[in-house]
Image: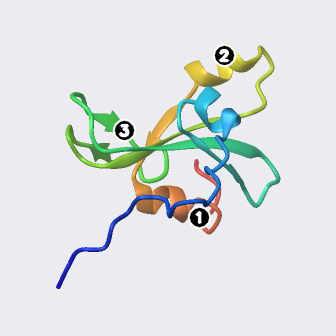
């Protein structure tokens, strides 16, 4: 069986470039239950470990996870990016179902 080509069919228009996604470094936008907007980027892994704010457990090096930062910050976009947090993917998905962290 021949493998199907993934190329765009001849005559079909090019997909439009998402300039906003390029400017956000490939991050997607999500809204939380509280109405806050987040930039979220999936990461295949990293060289260092991080503490997940959802479960307070360590995300070991080279483990896939997400990095999230708020779109609103009192001190602007650079401060929001500096406040980004690394989450386990499952913890990020369950953040709206968790009770308040103490």
Q: Residues within 10 Å of mark 2 (few under 14, many from 20)?
A: some
Gap between marks 2 and 1 measured at Cα: 26 Å
Q: Residue at the location (23% across, 74% down)?
A: 3
Q: Quadrant of residue 83?
A: top right
SS for tag 3? Answer: strand
The mark nearer the N terminus, 3 or 1, is 3
Single out the mark in the foreground, 2 or 1: 2
- Which residue is under mark 3? 51
Q: Residues within 10 Å of mark 1 (few under 14, many from 20)?
A: few
Q: Is residue 99 left or right of residue 74?
A: left
Frontmost residue, 75 versus 16: 16
Quarter of the figure with the N terminus: bottom left
- Which residue is under mark 2? 79
Residue 21, given in percent of the width and then of the height, sits at: 63, 37
Single out the mark in the foreground, 3 or 2: 2
Badge 3 vs badge 2, beta-carbon distance below 8 Å: no
Frontmost residue, 3 versus 79: 3
Q: Residues within 10 Å of mark 3 (few under 14, many from 20)?
A: some
Q: Residue at the location (53% across, 37% down)?
A: 26
Disc marking residue 88: none
Frontmost residue, 36 versus 18: 18
Residue 64, given in percent of the width and then of the height, sits at: 30, 49
The mark nearer the N terminus, 2 or 1, is 2
Residue 30, given in percent of the width and then of the height, sits at: 68, 52
Badge 3 vs badge 1, beta-carbon distance below 8 Å: no
Q: Is residue 19 left or right of residue 8?
A: right
The mark nearer the N terminus, 3 or 2, is 3
SS for tag 2? Answer: helix
Q: Residue furthest front?
A: 11
Q: Residue at the location (21% across, 28% down)?
A: 47
Residue 91, given in percent of the width and then of the height, sits at: 46, 58
- Which residue is under mark 1? 98
């Amino acid at each position: 069986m021949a493998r199907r080509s993934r190329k765009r069919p001849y005559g079909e228009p090019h997909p439009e470039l998402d300039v906003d996604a390029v400017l956000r470094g490939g991050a997607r936008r999500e809204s939380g239950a509280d109405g806050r907007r987040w930039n979220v980027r999936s990461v295949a892994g990293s060289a260092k470990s991080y503490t997940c704010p959802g479960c307070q457990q360590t995300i070991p090096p080279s483990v896939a996870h997400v990095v999230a930062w708020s779109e609103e910050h009192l001190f602007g976009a650079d401060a929001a990016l500096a406040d980004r947090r690394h989450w386990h993917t499952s913890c990020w998905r369950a953040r709206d179902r968790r009770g308040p962290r103490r």
